[in-house]
Amino acid sequence: MSTPVDLLHDMLAIPSPSGGEDELARFLEKSMNDLGLAARRDEAGNVIGDIGTGNGPVVMLLSHLDTVDRPLPARRDGDRLIGRGAVDAKGPLAAMICAAAARPSFPGTIRVAGAVEEERLSRGGEHLARTLPAPDALLVGEPSGWSRVVLGYKGKIDLDYRVARPATHSTNPAAKATEAAVGFWHDLLDALGPERDHGTFGLPAATLRGMHGDPAEAWLDIDCRIPLGFDADSFAERLRACANGGEITVVRHVPAVRSGRGDPVVRAVSAAIRRCGGEPRPTLKTGTSDMNTVAPHWNVPMAAFGPGDGSLDHADDEHITIDEFLKGVDVLTASLDELAAAL
């Protein structure tokens, strides 16, 4: 039987950019069945595996199969596993599978789900939230570091702005499409307010992710990160008022999410970290995850946890140390014990 490290290495060796997760999903369906989970795939391509006695609460461990589309061949270098997804999020998903497999007598059901397209529009997570009953507790697998528990994530608004103007000579004083697009970008920053910071959980921020244009047509791809309580409808209304003849499309909106320190999942993971010799550090993340995706559908205790250094997400040297990964497996296994007692 393969070890947890073998499982993760095999997962890293299978490229799975968003939209291309099929081979990894098939591999994990077989691997999870071999480890004692009853595994299947759903209509969206997600892989789902259940284990436990079945008589009791359902604890879902949710992570994602896909990675960004920047190939990074898998290899082992001393105490490090290198490869695309080592931390985001094949490391957390592999740790969840191994932890679940270690608790076949869990008094209820442990449901491990590997979702597709989290790096795009979270199609897999959305499908799970709409088609499965809400679990009694949810733990999302994202890199936090083995001694941190994530209480929440900023929300996100993805915007598409397109504008056209009559074609004309560059010396014509009439406004050009490119100029209208630049003006819209600055108006959007003003609409977010005077204080903007990607690194602060309580403040909004925006990134101009893509742009192209000429005097006749221009396009902007904008990523806004938003805090709890942000009024997305008023924001969109204000943007339309300053669109200057352009067309605005809200491609995706997910609100920010945050659990309290007294949340049963937060408490369970914190206790598990202590059991494994660490000092738990509650953390708030300024990105987004499938915790944002499912929270509007499932009003249940939830938190996020996973081995790995989140600063290596999407990086050219993405890697995880074997010690970090195995500690993550231990914390997740202990978390399941804590949840069995708490629920």
Image (spheres, rainbow, N blue to C red):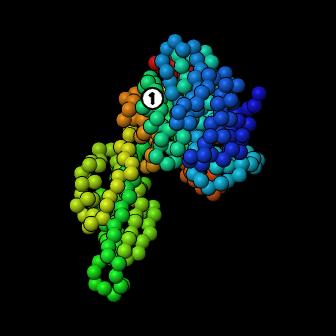
- Kindly indicate the quadrant of the structure image that contains residue 193: bottom left
Q: Is there any visible trace of residue 276 in the rendered image?
A: no
The answer to whether 271 is drawn above or below residue 290 in the figure is: above
Residue 39 location, x and y as percent?
Answer: 61, 26
> Which kind of residue does numbered mark 1 sit on?
Thr
- Between residue 79 and residue 17, name the one nearer to us: 17
* Farthest residue, direction bottom: 171
* Quarter occupied by residue 21: top right
Per the image, the residue denoted by label 1 is 131
Q: Residue, x 55% and y 35% (percent of image)?
A: 46
Q: Is residue 12 above or below residue 138?
A: below
The answer to whether residue 196 is visible is yes
Q: Residue furthest top?
A: 55
Quadrant of the image occupied by residue 172: bottom left
Q: Residue at x 64, y 49 (%)?
A: 84
**In which quadrant is the N terminus drawn?**
top right
Q: Secondary structure at mark 1?
A: helix
Between residue 293 and residue 20, name the one nearer to us.
20
Does residue 312 appear left or right of residue 122 in this picture?
right
Identify which residue is drawn at 47% across, 32% down: 128
Horizontally, residue 73 falls left or right of residue 196, namely right
Q: Is residue 73 above or below residue 60?
A: below
The x, y position of residue 313, in whole percent, is 56, 51
Q: Residue 204: x and y, percent?
A: 35, 54
Residue 262 as seen in the image, left or right of residue 24: left
**Count of all numbered marks drawn on residues in the image:** 1
Along the viewing direction, whichever of 54 and 96 lies nearer the viewer: 54
Q: Residue at x 46, y 27 (%)?
A: 132
281 sits left or right of 5 in the view: left
Q: Counting other residues with Cα less than 10 Å from the Cα at mark 1, is it few (<14), some (14-19), or many (20 or more)?
A: few
Residue 103's spot in the image, x, y percent?
Answer: 62, 20
